[in-house]
Image (tube, grey):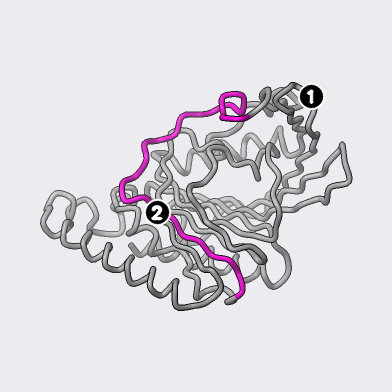
Amino acid sequence: MPGQRVGSRPWPQVVGVVALIVLGGCAVVVVANPDRLTETTGTSASLASRSNWDLATALPTSADFPAEWGYSLAGRLQRAKPLKSVASSERPNSGPAATYAPAPCASVPRLLDHSGGALAAYAQVDRYAQVVVRDAVPIDAAATGEGREHGPNARFAIWAVPDGPARIANYLKWLDQCSSYRVTNYFRDGQVKDERTVTTVVETRSAAGADAAAAVTRTFTNETGPEPTPRYHVAYYAVRGIVLECTVYMEGADLDLVTRLGTATLHKLGAL
């Protein structure tokens, strides 16, 4: 059920009303199903058992951002099956698989490729574009360097995963070897498309209210062209069976705003 803002406040308000109606229906189902009610009672219950729209209520709304920003929210009525790890060569309309150097960095952590996880809810904002979000990409291109996008923008994704704290710990261990690595991307005909050096700095390794957390800053340096050097600020929070991922391609006051909203989302999830 995607919603978008196209330049004025009334439409998101209508979407919000529709979402509340959907949530009301879900509430009736919960009351009628004692087993599920037992699963979700108390702060120790897994959030993965909550509906996508239950989880989406924790995400920022269009009213949290400046009126001129594009906003989109997506949450499937039925959660998709967990993703398998998908190599870039297996994705539609792609060329040969991206190559990594040094070689150990080619083993992309599950926190980045989302294998075994299922997307529950997703919100995106963009400073200049009116965005429509369908789903998060199968692999986090903003983490691996396998994609390129125009900013400034920010994304909030909630993933249902069975092992969030372990994924974060594994990612931090991977960064011990791969805090800086090179990614080479290819066109479909096998020609080199671009080469990027990805440098990651770990900012924090914990957060109040999270079972496990990590915040990093990633910088992408293009080795084959005059493209700008983007910098992403990304936070991962594991909370009772889900991982909240906040990716921010912004700076200054905009970054501060989105970072605060990411923390607020974490606390809302913890209260569910």
On the rendered image, what quadrant is the N terminus found in?
bottom left
Identify which residue, 205 or 49, lies in the foreground.
49
| Mark 1: few/some/many CA within 10 Å (<14, 14-19, 20+) | few
In what element is the residue under mark 1?
Answer: loop
Q: Is residue 127 above or below residue 145?
A: below
Q: Residue 178 vs residue 81: left or right?
A: right
Amino acid type indicated by mark 1: Gln
**Residue 77 covered by magenta stretch:** yes
Q: Is residue 268 left or right of residue 85?
A: left
Q: Residue 264: image x %, image y %?
A: 49, 68
Query: How many marks do you count on the picture?
Result: 2
Residue 127 rendering spot, x and y as whole percentages: 66, 66
Magenta stretch: dominant SS? loop
| Above or below 222: residue 93 | above
Circle 2 sits on which residue? Answer: 75
Residue 100 lies, in percent from the top left, at 73, 27
Which residue is pictured at 40% across the width and 35% down the height? 82
Where are the magenta residues, as a range?
68-93
Q: Residue at x 68, y 22 (%)?
A: 96
**Quadrant location of residue 256?**
bottom right
State the mark number for residue 191: 1
Q: For the residue marked with disc 2, what is the amino acid? A: Gly
Residue 223 sits in quarter = top right
User: The C terminus lies in which quarter of the figure?
Assistant: bottom left
Q: Is residue 190 left or right of residue 91?
A: right
Gap between marks 1 and 2, in whole Å? 37 Å
Indicate the secondary structure of the residue bearing disc 2. loop
- What residue is rendered at 56% in x and 24% in y? 90
